[in-house]
Image (cartoon, rainbow, N blue to C red):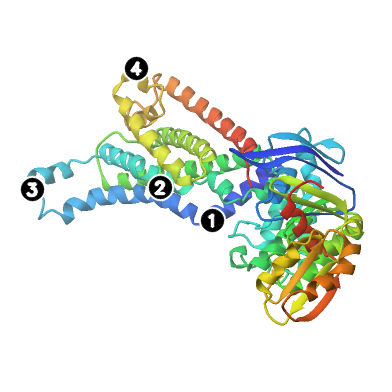
Amino acid sequence: MIKVVNLRKNYGRLEALKSISFEVEKGSVFGFIGRNGAGKTTTMNILTGLIRFNGGEIFIKGKDFLKNKQELVRSIGYLPETPTFYNYMNAYEYLNFIGKIIGYDLKKSRKSVGRLLETVKLAKQGKRRIGGYSRGMKQRLALAVAFMNSPEILFLDEPASALDPEGRMEMLEIIEGLKDNKITIFLSTHILNDADRVCDKICIIDEGKILLTKNLSRLHETYIQPIFDVEFEEDPGDEVNLLKKLNWVESIKENGRRISIYVKDIGYAKKEILKEISKLNVNVTGYQVRKSTLEDIFMRMVSKNEII
Amino acid sequence: MRSFKAYFKKEILESARTNKYLILFVGTVFWALMDPLMLKLLPLLLKNYLPADLAVLFSTFTRDTAFQTFLKDLFQIGTLFIVFSLMGLLSNEVYLKKLVFPYSRGANPTGVVLAKYIHHAATISLFILIAFLTNYFYINRLFTGGILSIEIALKSSLLYILYYSVLLSILLYLSSLFRRGLVAGISVLVFVYSLSIFNRFKVVRAYLPNYLLLKANDIGHIFDNSLIPTVIVSFSLIILLVFFSILRMKKVDVA
């Protein structure tokens, strides 16, 4: 559905995207994750035709994006991270305005706008000026704009960032619903639990480079290495350095009395880890082996920042 | 055409709700009302404070001189109102990221730019026409003498309309170049006020839009052959600058 080949984007001397390539299958949810400034929003802005790019090729629905931009953007819906509207309009007026751009006639526009505002739960506030909306309400209105004209591809940039927990859950349910309707979703998020729940494929981007692109199930299989969480009676301090020196230990994440040990060799670690911990001059109060989450995988990838 | 219609309606709504119509109305029609009144009332209000020779000067105002005073004020103050209220025509849309949704849903930059230009050119033209007719009405009530007629007032208003249409096209283009509307506004003001320097040079002035204002002031000889190059240059400038604004808006990064 979307094919990106060696995409490059520069802002002056800064290389925002360094020849990135990936593919998004039709009807899938593609999770695009990365730190702030990694290049997620830049990529989305390019793919929605809002900014130009310096090199590479983009194909959407098999068509060259540059040559067919005007036609292709009509099948795309975009929810930006910080949506901006004409604040003097109300939600009905704004959606009708976008409807006119899309090419709705008055009857279709009225029907569609009413239904969309019901879907995003803004029907009651639809006649209020947008300038008076909260950030969450603006986010929901932006979602209604993105849904207009039933797009085949949806780009969602941090869709839950401004929502309360209830709104976030609703957003995830909406995404799952869209997935059932075979809509292709390009989801940028830093809430990795959300990506874990709804995405089919994960792409990790850092400093303008793609570090990894994998199906979520394959990702868990490949990086399923467990993490050893240990809790001490008191802060272990420098005692942890003894563990760091062991050649089968990859890294240790310290958090007060708790440490998480990432290992290179699972089999060996399982045999040796308790022996090594017992050598430390601190009492152990807890020990558990945890399956690595998407967050753990992400942290590993971006700290290495090298292509796997 | 879809984008043109959508943006034309949006510009009407925006101008009404953000008081742009009111500001433009005050900047044009207000002076048409106030100028003749002030010219008539000032000598009466200040008769005890003015030296005799200055008081005589006030009493010699005819309909023609009253009309020319209005034209001068409209250029000096009306231009400020028009430029400062419309300086963010395109720059604000880009800088405040208002075009993200419309562009992502397929808005056509040609329609957007044309809708903005045509709407504001029509608004300014209408207000100028109202201003000239209002001014003519009051001048006829308050002053005597001179050769001013409705035909002269309408001819003069046409030249002002053309002048402000050129000014609007310059503003539109600079607004597409700069991210800040204020920079575009000040650049336009510096440009149009400095063009007045060329009024002294007969060979050059007929090719510059400011000559339209000179001729509008020339009561009795408003339309003559000397206006032909000015009108051609003015229309060419409008077409070129609107075209360049469209090109710019097709290439600009809106996010």
Which comes before the other along the chain, label 4 or label 2?
2
Could you say where residue A176 lies in the image, as x and y percent from the top left? 87, 63
Q: Point out which mark residue B51 bears.
A: 3
Have a look at marks 4 and 3 and say if they share a chain: yes
Q: Chain of mark 3?
A: B
Q: Point out which mark residue B81 bears.
A: 2
Which comes before the other along the chain, label 1 or label 4?
1
Label 1 crowd bin: few (<14), some (14–19), many (20+), radius 10 Å: few
Label 4 crowd bin: few (<14), some (14–19), many (20+), radius 10 Å: few
Q: What residue is at 33 percent from the left and 30 percent from the top?
A: B196
Which comes before the other along the chain, label 3 or label 1?
1
Q: What residue is at 84 percent from the left and 69 percent from the top?
A: A273
Which comes before the other along the chain, label 4 or label 3?
3
**Residue at the disc numbered 4:** B203
Q: Is residue A58 left or right of residue B207?
A: right
Q: Relative to the observer, which residue lies in front, B67 or A189?
A: A189
Q: Relative to the observer, which residue lies in front, A138 or A7?
A: A7
Q: Amino acid at mark 3?
A: Pro
| Real-space Cα separation, disc 4 to disc 2, in angstroms | 31 Å
Q: Is residue A149 left or right of residue B38?
A: right
Element type at mark 1: helix
**Residue at the disc numbered 1:** B16
Q: Amino acid at mark 1?
A: Ala
